[in-house]
Image (cartoon, rainbow, N blue to C red):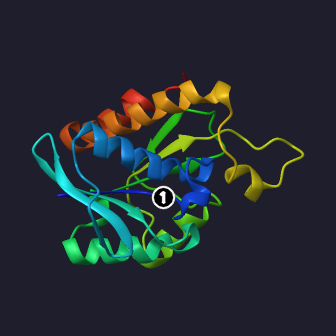
Amino acid sequence: MYIIIGLGNPTVKYQATRHNIGWDAITRLSDDYRIPMDFKKHKAICGSGYIEGEKVILAQPLTYMNLSGESVRELMDYYKVDPENIIIIYDDISLDVGQLRIRKKGSAGGHNGIKSIISHLGTTEFPRIKIGVGDKPEDWDLADYVLSRFRDEEQEAIRGALKDASDACRMMITSGIEAAMNQYNRKK
């Protein structure tokens, strides 16, 4: 069993912002694999289904970003899943818009959602898919930038990244993380 968690902030105010790309990736997975997001549990909107015969739980935490670890910990404990079977999807400003980077483990790199998860799980060893949202312009505040929406000229790259993230999850489940890293960690 795998739990795939997309980080973001709840409420309409944050929909379709750079910081909510993880939530958007879960919506894409839900659509691609016909997994209805139809129950609230563990401080998250969840869906239960299968990807290539493997049971998965999809989750969009309802905690705000910097409390994401609360939801992740509850999901992990309830379903008795080890950290290596949790896939976290989130935004990364150090990657170009639409670029993916898959990792087996790693530091928070300044991302408050990941800091919270590391704190609640007590480990940095959980798979993650980072989706590039682009670096902030020099004259922007970081919080304002990550809470901004993608520009029209970025939409195609973001749609492609969400498809790639969905495909990468499938590959991580069926062929392993190494195969997914080899396939998706290339610059476009």
Is residue 56 at all visible to an observer of this figure?
Answer: no
Residue 133 position, x and y percent, is: 62, 41
Count of labels in the image: 1
Residue lying farthest to the top in this orientation: 188
Residue lying farthest to the front in this orientation: 12
Residue 24 position, x and y percent, is: 46, 46
Q: Residue at x 38, y 30 (%)?
A: 182
Badge 1, how many Cα within 10 Å: few under 14, some, many 20+? many
Q: Residue at x 49, y 39 (%)?
A: 101
Q: Nearer the viewer, residue 166 or 36?
A: 36
Q: Which residue is mark 1?
A: 7
Residue lying farthest to the right in this orientation: 139
Which image quadrant is residue 78 in?
A: bottom left
Residue lying farthest to the left in this orientation: 53
Label 1 sits on what residue type?
Leu
Residue 136 position, x and y percent, is: 76, 44
Q: Is residue 91 left or right of residue 51?
A: right
Q: Is residue 105 left or right of residue 2?
A: right
* Local SS, label 1: loop
In the depicted structure, whether residue 36 falls above or below residue 68: above
Q: Residue at x 56, y 49 (%)?
A: 91
Residue 28 position, x and y percent, is: 37, 41
In the depicted structure, whether residue 173 falls above or below residue 108: above
Q: Residue at x 25, y 41 (%)?
A: 176
Is residue 37 at all visible to an observer of this figure?
Answer: yes
Q: Is residue 34 left or right of residue 19?
A: left
